[in-house]
Image (spheres, helix red, strand yellow):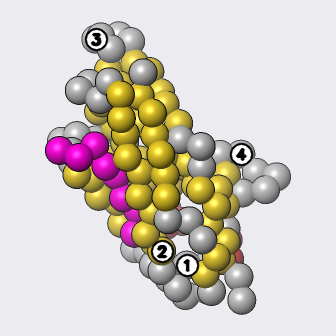
Amino acid sequence: QVQLVESGGESVQPGGSLRLSCKASGTTYNINTMGWYRQAPGKQRELVATMTTDGTINYADSVKGRFNISRDNAKNMVYLQMNSLKPEDTAVYYCYTQSVLSRLVRRDYWGQGTQVTVSS
């Protein structure tokens, strides 16, 4: 089992910046991908950014050039630096990780979510 705890969500004005943090604990030795998803009211949860242990990164088109994902594998931490925030970035942001249990079996884990509100 893996537990994920996010922090850093708050209210910010358009154009502002925030940094989200997430710490994984529990059985972490077989974690591969870590990242962030978000869910706005009335919408489906969507990918924001993910990063594998070897550094492969995937961003949603809507955040490219504004958000930056990073990891500290030694500390089992993942971060999301969000710049030039827009009202449409308002959502609950969920930390995500995937453990590789075997060649064919993987398990997904989710944090409780942290609210990011972008409003003037």
Name the residue tied to disc 4: 44
Q: Secondary structure at mark 1?
A: loop
Query: Image point 79% across, 56% down: which residue?
Result: 41
Image quadrant where residue 11 sits: bottom right
* Mark 3 vs mark 2, CA separation in Å: 37 Å
Residues in magenta? 74-81
Check the image and report above or below for 97 versus 119.
above
Q: Of the residues shown, which amino acid type is indicated by label 4?
A: Gln
Which mark is drawn over residue 85? 1
Q: Residue 13 in the image: x percent, y percent?
A: 62, 86
Tell me which secondary structure the magenta stretch mostly adopts: strand
Q: Secondary structure at mark 4?
A: loop
Query: Image point 33% across, 14% down: which residue?
Result: 101
Mark 1 vs 2: CB contact within 8 A = yes
Q: Of the residues shown, which amino acid type is indicated by label 2?
A: Leu
Name the residue tied to disc 2: 18
